[in-house]
Amino acid sequence: MSFEQELKQAACELGFDLAGIADVQPARHAAAYRAWLKEGHNADMDWIARNVETRIDPAIWQPEAESMLVLAVSYATQKPDSKVWNDPMRGRIARYAWGRDYHKVIRKRLDRLAAWIAEHGPRGVKSVYFNDARPMLEHDAALAAGLGFIGRNTLLIHPEWGSMMFLGGLLLSCKLKADAPTPGSGEKILSPAGKASDCGNCRRCLNACPTHAFPAEYILNSRLCISYQTIENRNAIPDALRPKFGNWIFGCDVCQEVCPWVKRFSHSGKAPWLVAEPDRMAPRLDELAELDDEGFLARFAGTPVMRTKRRGMLRNVAVALGNSRHPDAQAPLEKLAQDPESLIAEHARWGLSRLNDN
């Protein structure tokens, strides 16, 4: 067995579901990335626009690196119970946030794999991790390592796992035999099982987006994306978008839920940690409306939901309560309308107006 095969086997034993190897190289979609930034589609996520050249070429920030080990972990889990998922008095949370913060979970696995490489790999090899918090274009790295293709919704799709995957990896200071890269746009891709795969003529993800966040295929306007608005936006949600959110309060999975690759092929990985419990996937909105800072921390500590802070979460809750059109939403909205945090109070007043707008 070659070292590359041993490395991939070790990665799987340590909780990764897919592993691919590529030479350290500039991202093939560098021009598209620059154009996307120029159009302002990153909204106010300024960190995406920093270190542009470094993100495009990993060799700039890690000149010793020669190979990329790109890894994926499935976060597909049980299908939500429809009665809970569609309850207007519950707020939907995107699947990836149904448990512990993935950054911490994946980082621990990467650390263990780096330790394995230090023991079993070439003498003196150095490993540097990347996992959503380093200047890397992970999707392009995954393409280079043959881990799938880019769908019209801009997500990486593996023909035997779908798109519900966390990406990360290690930059290694040694030369490894690279895997065959994913073919370019328009070319058919063969999965390991021999299935031809791409999006074909399917546009379900684009058509299903509640806020029409895709101005064109393969382009996402973050300002219109429910995930951006409920998580990254620290200010008021535009009035015109609020009615389109439904009961999403943290992220959105719509463009993945409708994808045929996700519906047919996504499945739980080797070491799952996300659980489709009602209060994790769709907590009651009236209960969330009661949370103070201490209560918010007690409920969501250690999960991705902490990113919104109480201020952002209850802003989102107010919008979902208004969209519920449910009489039980009146009392919690009235309470939130008196919140000392002006952002929450304003959105609650909007919720009340929508609730009573027949």
Image (cartoon, rainbow, N blue to C red):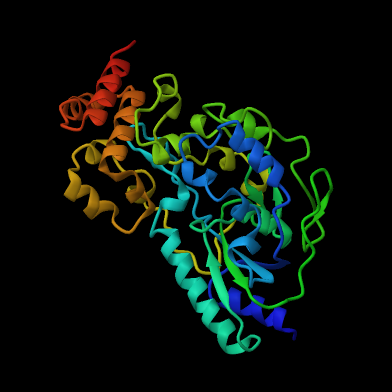
Lateral position of residue 68 relative to residue 102, left or right = right
Which quarter of the picture shows residue 259? top right
Residue at the spot x=65%, y=50% of the render?
156
- How many marks do you count on the picture? 0
Is 297 displayed left or right of 196 in the figure? left
Q: Quadrant of residue 205?
A: top right
Up the image or down, 22 lies above or below 332; here it is below
Query: Where does the image place residue 37, in percent across and percent down from the top left?
Result: 59, 37
Residue in the foreground of this view, choosing between 347 and 178? 178
* Residue 285 percent coordinates (x, y): 28, 37
Q: Nearer the viewer, residue 278 or 92?
A: 92
Q: Residue at x 69, y 71 (%)?
A: 66
Front position in the image: 217 or 83? 217
Image quadrant containing the N terminus: bottom right
Q: Position of residue 290 (x, y in %)?
A: 18, 39
Extreme-right residue of the structure? 187
The image shows residue 82, relative to residue 69, as above or below, that is: above
- Residue 249 visible (yes or no): no
Residue at the image position 61 percent from the left and 82 percent from the top: 125
Q: Is residue 122 above or below residue 111?
A: below
Q: Position of residue 249 (x, y in %)?
A: 37, 38
Res. 344 visible in picture: yes
**Residue 194 figure quarter:** bottom right
Image quarter in which the C terminus is found: top left
Q: From what the image shows, is residue 211 above or below residue 189?
A: above
